[in-house]
Image: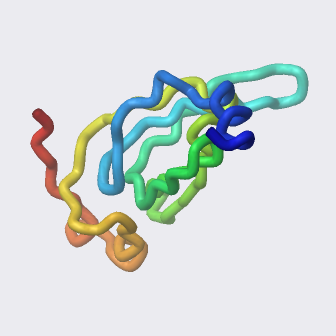
């Protein structure tokens, strides 16, 4: 085992559900405002997932008032309160950046059966 992997092992979260590109997820993020802290939900479609141990990230895109908003989350960050999969989507690519150019019915993703 490499030295870096041994150090990263203690920071990896064990409560992460299985998800991939095309899935709709709800990420509850801790937001600090001054000395107060609150939880804010960010729900959208996963555009990509970058797997790199403790440095893993995933990109979520949502529509807010007709404007597309994307956010990149570190998967093992302590700022993420919880992560839940709302629905599994069926896509044929690992990176679905083509959703950026589509809106309305063209931006829909079919549901995937999960066994």
Along the horizontal axis of the image, is 113 left or right of 100?
left
Which residue lies at the image location 21% right of the left edge and 66% below the top edge? 92
Left or right, 41 with respect to 30, comes to left
Here the colouring is rainbow
Q: Which residue extends farthest bottom?
A: 101
Name the quadrant containing residue 70: bottom right
The quarter in which the C terminus is drawn is top left
- Image x and y of residue 75, in percent: 57, 40
Q: Nearer the viewer, residue 90 or 35?
A: 90
Instruction: State the quadrant of the N terminus.
Output: top right
Residue at (67, 43) in percent of width and height: 2
Asked whether residue 41 is in view, the answer is yes
Count numbered badges in the picture.
0
Q: Where residue 28 sits: x, y (%)? A: 54, 30
Residue drawn where x is 61% and y is 35% of the image: 76
Q: Tell me what residue is drawn at x 22 percent, y 72 percent.
A: 106
Q: Position of residue 107 (x, y in %)?
A: 27, 67
Q: Is residue 42 left or right of residue 90?
A: right
Above or below, 103 against 22 in this view is: below
In the picture, residue 85 is in which quadrant? top left
Q: In the rendered view, does 5 fall on the left or right side of 46?
A: right
Front-lying residue, 14 or 42: 14
Q: Is residue 64 visible?
A: no
Residue 61 x %, y %: 46, 57
Q: Residue furthest right?
A: 34
């Amino acid at each position: 085992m490499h030295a870096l992997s041994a150090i990263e092992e203690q920071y990896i979260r064990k409560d992460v559900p299985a998800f991939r590109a095309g899935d709709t997820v709800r990420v509850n993020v801790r937001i600090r405002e001054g000395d107060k802290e609150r939880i804010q939900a960010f729900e959208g479609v996963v555009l990509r997932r970058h797997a790199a141990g403790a440095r893993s990230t995933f990109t979520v895109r949502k529509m807010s008032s007709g404007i597309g908003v994307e956010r990149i989350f570190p998967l093992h960050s302590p700022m993420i309160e919880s992560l839940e999969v709302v629905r599994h989507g069926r896509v044929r690519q690992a990176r679905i950046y083509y959703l950026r150019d589509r809106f309305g019915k063209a931006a829909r993703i079919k549901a995937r059966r999960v066994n």
